[in-house]
Amino acid sequence: MDFKLTEEQELIKKNMREFCEKYVDPIAAEIDENSRHPAEVFQKLAEGDWMGIPIPAQYGGSGADYLTHICAVEELARSCASTGFTVSIHVGIASMLILLFGNEEQKKTFLVPLAKGEKLGAFVLTEPGAGTDVMAATTTAVLDGDHYVINGTKTFTSNGPTGDTYLVFAWTDKAAGRKGMSAFIVPRGTPGMTAGNHFAKMGLRSSQTSEMLFKDCRVPKANLLGKEGNGLAMAMTGFDHGRTGIAAQAVGIIQAALEESVRYAKERVQFGQPIARHQAIAWMIADMATDLNAARFLTYHAAWLKDQGQPFSKEASMAKLFASEKAMHHTIKAVQIQGGYGYCKGAKVERLMRDAKITEIYEGTSEAQRMVISGNVLR
Amino acid sequence: MAVLWIFSETTASTKELLGLGRELISAVGGSITVLMGPDGEGREEWAAYGADEIILLPLLADGLAMEAHIPVIAAAAAEEKPDIILLPATARGREMAPRLAQRLDTGLCSNCVAVRWSGGDIEMDRVVYGGAAIQTVKFLTRPVMATVAPKTFSPPVPEEGRSARLRELPPLAAGTVPGVRIVEKREKRRLARDLTQAKVVVAAGRGLEKKEDLALVEEFASLVGGEVGCTRPLSEELHWLPTELCIGLSGVSVKPDLYIGVGVSGQVQHMTGVRGAKVIAAVNRDENAPIFAQADLGIVGDLYEALPKLITALKK
Amino acid sequence: MPHIVVCFKWVIDETYLRRAPGGGLDFSSVDYKLSDYDRNAIEEAVRIRTALGGTVTGITVGPPEAAKGVKDALSRGMDAGVFIADPAFVDLDPSQTVSLIAQAVRNHVGPFDLIICGEGSGDLYAQQVGPRLAEALGIDCVAFATQISLEGGTLTAQRRLEGVIEVVTAPLPALVTVLPEINTPRIPGVKDTLMAGKKPVRTLAKGDLGATGGPRLQTLAVRAAAMERACEKFGVEEAEVIRFVDALKKRGVLA
């Protein structure tokens, strides 16, 4: 057993914290309020090689391990859950899937600019009628000469309005069931693909989410990712990576909730003493700190398994399930500790609570995680 | 009996060093020598303030900085073996002292804030860990050397009719002339306000949300007859105020009658620069902010609520 | 193309220091960091190398745990490191540190053009190592520079003294100490940190260097800085604010 990060991981985590204090903390409240994508921060993230940490150097990344990427997402989310998430889905799903399943040509064309942070990736799977029930999707891709022609409507696409490189999932053979879906790399500007309605969200507001509309969108055959019919399996692999990232995002949120709670509890005086000395508050903080440790270990363990080349599907789901539910639970407590002040705009805990909720929903709801986990345990 | 040397750079620092020197010498007996530039300007005054001897340093060639005196002073000290050498903790003093100490192969207490005899030994205190702690040192070699923090010791009361012997040191020997040459020298833009002379200092800290809010602090400061200074982040990171107004370890030290920290958390690096204030007051919304443990009087409350109320109260 | 040597120190991060009961210091939860002042020194060396070419060698003295500091420093753009390591090198006095660095520079670093030091260390802030090292090596010294440049074997530096700015020149090799305002240190990127571990580090043990001699200063005590203050607290309600103003007047510090 070794519960220590390596020197490199520790230094990189520290540097990310310094980065956040300098560039993210000062704008986090503003980009939430205005639902603004902070392009200037992503520019800086690209300059510091933060947008492709686990991607090998030959494809424009840093060539570090997945755990290092997870540490960076955690620190980013501690300052701004939206920014942490954008990096997570860009790296963990969009870039990782091209790395794992793309051919050499696709990696050169699409992965290199993603890993360098010159382009932003998006994952286009969910449809209005197909959330957890992926099989209910209706978007199709029909081969026509050298092109696939995609038709359908996707929704809740993160980085939809801001993305450059989209991984789009569509049926190439609906009759083949789980082996009938395929994935395509579709660059921004491809005729027939447009971002539809933008969603105004409760939380995660600086992350841009929209519908994606496909109308006779012609994608070259060369942009088929992996083999035809392999889409669903690839999406599941993407989720293993992405969910570990969401777990890290939730860990960052709990960390921030804990720090905010400790600060406030020492500062706020009621009944003649700081509320930290009231047992009711002290115990909330004890639970928060304990769950934070547990969530972090689950998350790091899932990333570590990935780095060891071992299966980590179940562990990624466990980390995501536990960390996200604890993030929700403890951000509610963090608002409770701050009372009326915590309920008002401008209090960081108010934003944390809104941001925490989505971690229980996207990249597989808590219920979907329990399906994965129980399926593994009861096998 | 002890022989104590003082290197004189500025009038103010020399007076303070003489104050400390007289205190030390009065306990054990001995003499005080002031080393000063060749013009000897103001040397009569040093006699009244307690100098028994004045040593005039040789004239430096054009372009040489005061640091060029190091070989001459080091040679004289090696020869005459004074027991104690004190320099002011000015920029120049802080460069010259360690270089002299290295030549004399002796220990140096940098930026000393307290001195006392203990048995036959001198003990000194200095500030470490950004002001969080005090280190007490004693010397295992001679001479004892120290740079002394400005405004730490008071000038002695002058005694009329005292006189001091006068002598000169020979000029730099060939081969000891340093290579450093001054090619340009300019007075720093003088700020209208000089924090170190102010009776009341109001420091603005990170509790301020935006630059425009400095106006509120300014208004409050003018009502208490004070000058506005700031913590390091405000001058060095946010650039809301010039570097000269940064108070603390790497900025200026102040010694006013009253210091009021507004939205100042009380980080040691800052507080070490206000240690000498007669009264320390604070306004901060964090009751556990370290400044309250270091303040005489503190308002626990948001500065945006407290300052307008203070302004109203002061206007009455 | 210049060879620049930078001195740096891995120090206790003072934000984690707590006062222990009884007035001592509680070091139990301390973390370490690269001294803030030294980040400026490294940044300046790397800035010059980027402009003029050449190499930057970093040098530090410390216990073996400071290896992480060497990596941190290398991630900021230095080309190579010299690590003078021994478990005993924890509380050296400045003259001892200088003796070790001077020997390492003379015998293990090779010819150099410029040595850059931070204005002081983040922990003890004695501000001695730079100027003492210049004397030990017999080279010219310029302290507290806010701007430096190298040209044709000459260092030009602007230094900030009380009330005056001096621009000075010195023949190389020379030593300069720099103030924090000279630059804004970078935050190392991911690749910088990963590459740091691959850069050459020469580790020198006690036996590789000659004796340092004993300490010249002996530390008798280190205790938490106590400010003996009244610590009287007031609320923010109007009556409390008036009581606060009256208290200031009573102390005679407010007219």
Image: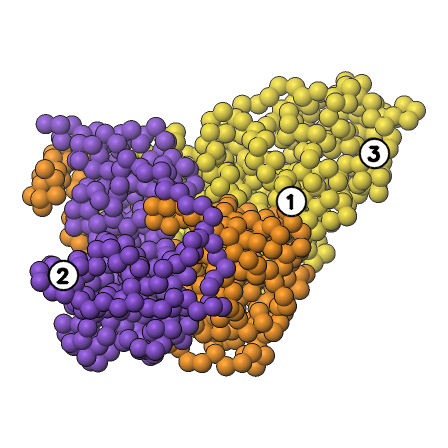
- Taking the spot 17% from the left edge, 35% from the top edge, the residue there is B225
Residue A174 shows in this picture: no
Mark 2: amino acid: Ala
Mark 3: amino acid: Leu
Question: Residue B199, how many percent across, how many down?
Answer: 18, 43
* In this view, C174 is above or below C108: above
> Which mark identifies residue A224?
3
**Which residue is labeled 2 in the image?**
B48
* In this view, C9 is above or below B122: above
Mark 1: amino acid: Asp
Tell me the colour chain B is drawn in.
purple
N-term-proximal mark, 3 vs 1 = 1
Circle 3 or circle 2, nearest the eye: 2
Q: Which chain is yellow?
A: A
> Which mark identifies residue A49?
1
Disc 2 on helix, strand or loop?
helix
In depth, the one of C211 and B191 nearer the eye is: B191
Other-residue count near label 2 (Cα within 10 Å), few / some / many at <14 / 14–19 / ≥20: some
Tell me the colour chain C is drawn in.
orange
- Which chain is home to disc 1? A
- Which chain is home to disc 3? A
